[in-house]
Amino acid sequence: MTSTWKEKLRGAMPPAWAEEIDAFETQIVLRKQGKIEEKLFAETRLRRGVYGQRYDNGQRHDGVESRVLSFPSGELTKGPMTMWDAPGMMRIKIPYGKLGADQLDAIAELAEEYSDGILHVTTRQDVQLHFVHIEDTPDLMRRLAAVGITTREACGNSIRNVTACPLVGVCSDEAFDITPYADAMTFFLLGHPDVQGFGRKFKIAFSGCKDHACGLTNFHDGGCIAKTKVVDGKTVRGFEFYVGGGLGSVPYPAKMLDEFCTEEELLPTIQAVSRVFAKLGEKENRSRARIKFLVKKLGIDEFSRLVREERQNLRPDPRWTAFLEDLHKRDEKPMKPPGQLPAGPYPAGFEAWSRSNLYHQKQKGYVVATVTLPLGDLTADQARALSDVARKFTGDTMRTTVDQNLCFRWLSESDLVAFYSALAAAGLAEAGAGQITDVTACPGTDTCKLGISSSRGLAGELRKQLRLVDAATSAASESLHVKCSGCFNSCGQHHVADLGFLGVSRQVGSRKVPHFQVVLGGEWTHNGGSYGLAIGAVPSKHVPEVVTRLRDRYVKEKNGTETFKDFIGRIGKKQVRAMLEDLMKVPAYEEARDLYSDWGDPREYNIGDMGEGECAGEVVAFAVMGLAAAEREVFEAQLLFDDGKNEQAAERAYKSMLTGAQALVRDLNPNIGDDADEIVSEFKTRLVDTKLFNDPFVGPKFAQMLLRAHEQKGKEQITNESTQHQLEEAQLFVEAAYACYQRMVQQRNAAAE
């Protein structure tokens, strides 16, 4: 009897994975029959890596090219889209970024057959396919499982993809190769019962060293930095173990849980951390449910005590140390002997590419070659071409990167010219990997339901413009990192960029204008060592000029090897703000219509959501002035913070929230006074209890920032870290106040009609 393709695949899949996929397929059927409620099914599909995605009349705007999908007439105009109405997104876990040629081929085939033919590499080393129908996802999962890839817990309240530096094992500065440890942790935690009760997601990163960007452990829920020490004359391996880091709306630096967690204790320690988080982490209020809030609430000392106590209560598990019996199981072996770069002449572009896209391994005669993927995208044909390149030159040594690129390790230097020529033939020989032109971006308004501004559109435009500068300026600024997020969630990692941009919107008259907050002072090195702060919002179309002015001044005035972060600290944010003040202004619609649309989309930004009414014009103008005053207060608070005046900065940040709340309340109650208790009470009654202030996507999260700040005023110890958190929260509250005001205007105009 002839076997079906599903039966053939079942033999290639781990049995447990096959059963899970069968179960998910059954759940899809039951949900369509109404036998499983949507809330439960949503968490189920998220844990299988299946997301809903945003639609805009079937049009996706990339900033590089538009991809138009065809749907039956009227299909996308029947109200809010769901997973059942139109395709969604499939996230594919690539543990620590490691990919083989057969795996890349399989994903390319799936992209072509079930998606729009594009593979997207994310800032967590995953691969995403967009425009995938939910009914097709079990078959995708089976074909992925047959080549050793799972989508389980790629999303949802789970342990997300474990990430790692793509240079581990070949880096000259690493303590040791963390690959076997990242691999062991990935599959130890996958489906583990102790990680199923989280209130929110949990992200883990590994780094082979402390000084470089590497694994960016500083902003992870759990971070492990390789370390060795001598005990009784013997060198032993371990990790600096960190917890409680995170970006999101308010970034937190990770806290050291253990200065030296031995390799034997690595897995039981993460299990104990997971149990503490599952037991004590917030469950109801999702905005406070990440582990960073639990660590802050308890303090790192108490959290550490609880982890140690939990560790003692764990039942022994042979998997804790089984992987240590063969740490070389995952070692990569070169396909070719080491060599030297042949003499020229070289193909056009080769020398520029080799300067920026190569890393010389500690193993002499080999390099790591990075393939630059514009905005993290490559076509199915390009993916297949790269699989062929891997089979010819390096074997299964590919690694995706958090910069949304793809590395080939163990490339013999003697093959460099041929390797480059193969990339050029596939249209993938662009130089500048990891440099200023290699702009990182989240999906933004293209496909993300939380997107406010077009981060991908902006990133595409910045890439184009930054490649046009003269050679001297390019060389002097090439080390800068530019990162764009479409909303406050920092999926584009804007907090740790030299130049970061965060999507927001502003109301100008009766129209909305896409904006980006300019975030400066972040540090990419030292594992994402410090976070930048927003200094003000500019219209989206003005952002390229912002980058030009800041880059040019940095090139002209920097002291020797001074970093951009130190340069900004030296000249001060007040000077920076003055440089950009004119770009923050928005002329009337009739004078500058271009500002009222976003990158990659010629239509007016959200014009369909806003009415043209002129009712309550004077009151609206007062509210706008109040919100602008609140934004200025945040900036003044930042200047105080930069001067080390934490108490004054915290007070000013609180005042900015109070000013923003007062502006909104006065729009509803002109008799409101200046008393803080009265403002907060009226704010709660008129805007929080009525849910008018609630963000459509995150609920009362931002309102709670003011209520909490007011309640805790004068009670909490003011530190550098707590002040930075208050500044971040104040900025977010003011942005939320702007958004609330836009909804109030919209409701008022709708009522007037």
Image (cartoon, rainbow, N blue to C red):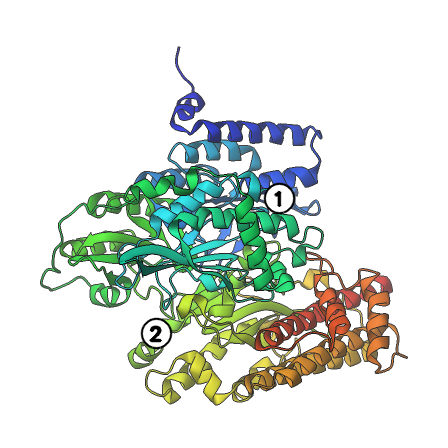
The answer to whether residue 568 is left or right of residue 395 is right
Q: Residue at x 60, y 56 (%)?
A: 290
The quadrant of the picture occupied by the N terminus is top left
**Most distant residue in the right direction:** 671
Q: Quadrant of the C terminus?
A: bottom right
Front residue of 523 and 647:
647
Q: Please state which amino acid type lies under the numbered disc 2.
A: Glu
Q: Are marks 1 and 2 in contact (CB under 8 Å)?
A: no
Quarter assignment of residue 474? bottom left
Q: Is residue 221 left or right of residue 676?
A: left
* Residue carrying label 2: 478
> What is the residue that sits farthest to the left in this orientation?
343
Residue at 31% x, 57% y is: 167
For image coordinates 82% across by 73% down, the residue present is 680
For disc 1, the marked residue is: 197
Going by the numbered disc 1, the residue's amino acid type is: Gly
Q: Local crowd at mark 1 within 10 Å, few (<14), some, or many (≥20)?
A: some
x and y percent of residue 409 in the render? 26, 53
**Left or right of 550, for residue 590:** right
Q: Earlier in the sequence, mark 1 or mark 2?
A: 1
List x then y, in percent, for residue 256.
Answer: 49, 63
